[in-house]
Image: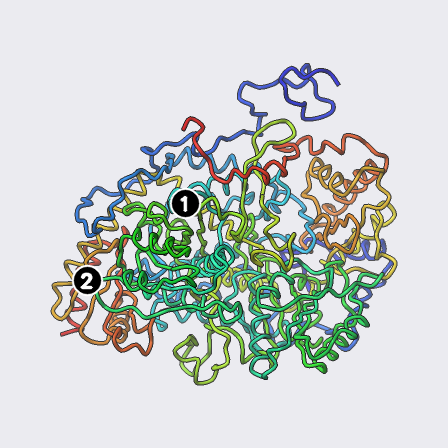
Amino acid sequence: MERMRYLPLTSSDRAEMLSVIGAGSVDDLFVDVPESARLSGPIEGLPNHASELAVERHMTALARKNMVAGDVPFFLGCGAYRHHVPASVDHLIQRGEFLTAYTPYQPEIAQGTLQMLFEFQTQVARLLGTDVANASMYDGSTACWEAIGMARRITKKSKAILSSGLHPHYVSVAKTMAKYTGDTLETGTPVLTAETDIDQMIAAIDGDTSCVVVQYPDILGRIADLTPLAEACHAKKALLIAVVTEPVALGAVRSPGEMDADIVVGEGQSLGVGLQFGGPYVGLMGCKDKYIRQMPGRFCGETVDADGKRGFVLTLSTREQHIRREKATSNICTNSGLCALAFSIHMTLLGEAGLRRMAGINHANACRAADRLAKVPGVKLVNDVFFNEFTIDLGREARPVVRTLAERGVLAGVSLGRLYPGEDALANGLVVAVTETVTAEDIETLAKALEEVLA
Amino acid sequence: MTINQSGWKPTSPEANEASVPVTFTGNRALMLEEKLIFEIGDSETTGVDFAEGDVAGSRLGDLSRKDPIGLPGLSEPETVRHYTRLSRQNYAIDLGLFPLGSCTMKHNPRLNEKMARLPGFSDVHPLAPVDTVQGALEVIHQLAHWLVTLTGMTSVAMSPKAGAHGELCGILAIKAALEKRGEGHRKVILVPESAHGTNPATAAFAGFSVEDIPATADGRVDTDALKARLGPDVAGVMITNPNTCGLFERDLKDISDAVHAAGGYVYCDGANFNAIVGRVRPGDLGVDAMHINLHKTFSTPHGGGGPGSGPVVFSEALTPFAPLPFVEKTGEGFRLVEEENADDHHADSFGRMVAFHGQMGMFTRALTYILSHGADGLRQVAEDAVLNANYVLRSLENTLDAPFAKSGPCMHEAIFSDEGLAEGFSTIDVAKALIDEGFHPMTMYFPLVVHGAMLVEPTETESKAALDQFIGALASVAERAKAGDPSLKTAPHFAPRARLDETLAARKPVLVWKDKAA
């Protein structure tokens, strides 16, 4: 083949190097591959290399087949939220020194990543209201499962109670894993009412309960004081795990840590990361000090160098797979470093004042939308309280309505039929998320479109 | 050495107060010290303007936040400067050769980044109606086709979030397949002692007990020992190929046949797929499941430790057990197979591993890379990666001990040991001195089967000139280590920090910043 743009060796380089090696051809370097498994040429049926321009055309054509959230009135949430990300965030994460670095195993030449992680851990701990936080997880759903496993190790009990308000995909992930770890999960489906299931969970806690997992705000957008639940957990020596899928909410409401949750996990996608069709995202995980040695994932810690200067290193690695192998707290190797960086930069740009204002705007927009949509004939607002996401009852099956509205260029929300297929009692529910990116016109467009479709 | 009145050790052996002044700022020209955001920001400052507008309305019940959170803010210029300064304390592929063995630190093409940021990919919600995201599903489908074809396997699970998550996916599929056969009693997974630590950790997580299989003197799995251990309690094996010594497991097909005959499955750790992409299909070696690190072989950025992406290819035997969701081509377009429609033809799936569809942002990058290289280019990738590693091996085998050099060529990485270094000198001293030479060190002390292992993986994106400079530097450092040069023990001398006290960090963990005044 002619020169490929990502491969610097020239033909004469290759020849010269082969002679240093003492090999006749590159095939000689593959002698250990059994003859039956050697491919004699490029794999058939696949295209050969292409120019940057050709690839760009191909990918752009694929991208154009998707409806872009920013092009239409957009109200989807349920675990992934569309927020405005300042331009400098994406600029900074594309600096090659961040983008093309590795896990900071050589701390002397990775202080940039390490200091950033230390700052991230502190920001996350403060936001969640926990003593400490780790250097990030894959995403919220895997962090949620890891928290359940952590509670088992701490309490030496294996029955977890999962709130019916926990994101059904998070429940699904936990169910998959529990099949193999022997944990028992008590789960349920939500009811289309303003009340959460906190009282039922309090009643269900017993001496075998390792933890209660509650989402805050929950899948229908409801929020409730977790303090009584924490007390009930602790009375039975169980842990309270709180799950936050919309961290912006914590700019407006009390954090789970303040309400005495033991482990708080979250999906950090809202800040800095973007929608990206579901990934990569960034899992947040914090806990009380006394549990840090049972935490999965990476920790960055402060220390000093040989000259006495402050520096940062990955630490407490005796919990981890590369040291402990089969006795590790988790098999996790990577975190979500670059997404954690995006989260941290966005949070630094916002600061406390910016986050609280952003949260205030989200809430005000959501209140406005809820009031307007409640006026649509046939529509009932389910929630009494909410942050930037609430559920409405359309009085008829919501899933086809969402599809019809999408055809009209309005992405109206997530139907509960999509999340809970086969649950007839939920089929009329539509979860509507309203962030700072939604305009008054967007709300009016949605309301009018709903009026027409429901008429 | 003269007395250092600053109280700090000079940062190089030649340094003394006369030639290297202590600066007022602590900075050294382009090397800029940077405080923590908690020391420079405050809770009133923000770098984000929101339009005026009322924030009235409270449906928060009695949960309104009352206490401060403690989040410092910075203006945009301060933010840009803070993170730019931090970035300059990092080594990165963009700066130079990054020979971290088993990590495949190759160039990250910028077209990948541009394509991933097209709004049609970056600004699309995972729960948007399927009819509105056909392009996204098509990306997943196209990438899946490439991965299946390049590996010679039957199917691929795209959702695992990273290599270790992919291992878990493969092991859970094996477990589900065994249970389906009524052979859930098979509890043992055999793992060679040269394996990545994630292998035994993954197997143990899934409830298997792990037994080590020894390596032979030539750095490969002891096939006889492995075969001897097979039996009715063995669920399968986890083998890395090419292995972590940088060698191709010649007997893998033979091993696979034996494992299958004994009723087990073969998991292949695909971390080192870069060495064979386009030249060998793991499916031809009898592999049942293998994860592919898109951030290694397919050039998605490592990002300082993630996000990764670890799709898992499956053989026909394990395909029915693959996780949800996945993308399927229909007559009209593409659909998602999820919990609600899995029953009709995918009822044996072991379930869901992640909330949504996997690392879409990595799929767009990997597909961009794959299309750029094509079938012929990917084959050339493997050839150049192997050529570069053998060039390093042969150029240094007379300077450093190369335990497997005599047994033939290596694959994509060359391994050396610390034998022959002066008394009291070890791999870490060589590694830290390489930092002063302007390189990221190689992987140290891994795999465990080689004493003081130094695992060098140059990748195919290094020019001969870059390799020659690296070889020269490593040879020079190795000679100093053999001669017992004491300055190696205090290396690095020119990095932003000297050696850091990791023991202190672990003994008294400081994991979050606390206001010292408080």
Specify few, some or many for label 1: CA neighbours under 10 Å numbering under 14, 14-19, or 20 or more.
Answer: many
Q: Is B120 located above or below residue A83 in the figure? A: below
Q: Residue at x 81, y 46 (%)?
A: B418
Q: Is A76 located above or below residue A13 in the figure? A: below
Picture coordinates of residue A323, whole percent (x, y): 65, 52
Q: Earlier in the sequence, mark 2 or mark 1?
A: 1
Amino acid type for the residue under numbered disc 1: Thr
Dot 2: chain letter: A
Is B270 placed left or right of B341 in the picture?
Answer: right
Residue at the spot of label 2: A445
Q: Residue at x 79, y 30 (%)?
A: B486
Foreground residue among B70 and A105: B70
Residue at the spot of label 1: A130
Q: Nearer the viewer, mark 2 or mark 1?
A: 1
Picture coordinates of residue A249, whole percent (x, y): 31, 50
Q: How far, Cα to Cα, is label 2 from label 1?
A: 41 Å
Dot 1: chain letter: A
Q: Secondary structure at mark 2?
A: helix
Foreground residue among B118 and B21: B21
Foreground residue among A315 and B169: A315
Residue A394 visible = yes
Foreground residue among B92 and B237: B237
For the N terminus of chain B, the quadrant is top right
Residue A57 visible = no
Q: Secondary structure at mark 1?
A: loop
Is A12 placed left or right of B67 in the picture?
Answer: right
Picture coordinates of residue B168, whole percent (x, y): 57, 66
Picture coordinates of residue B138, whole percent (x, y): 46, 71
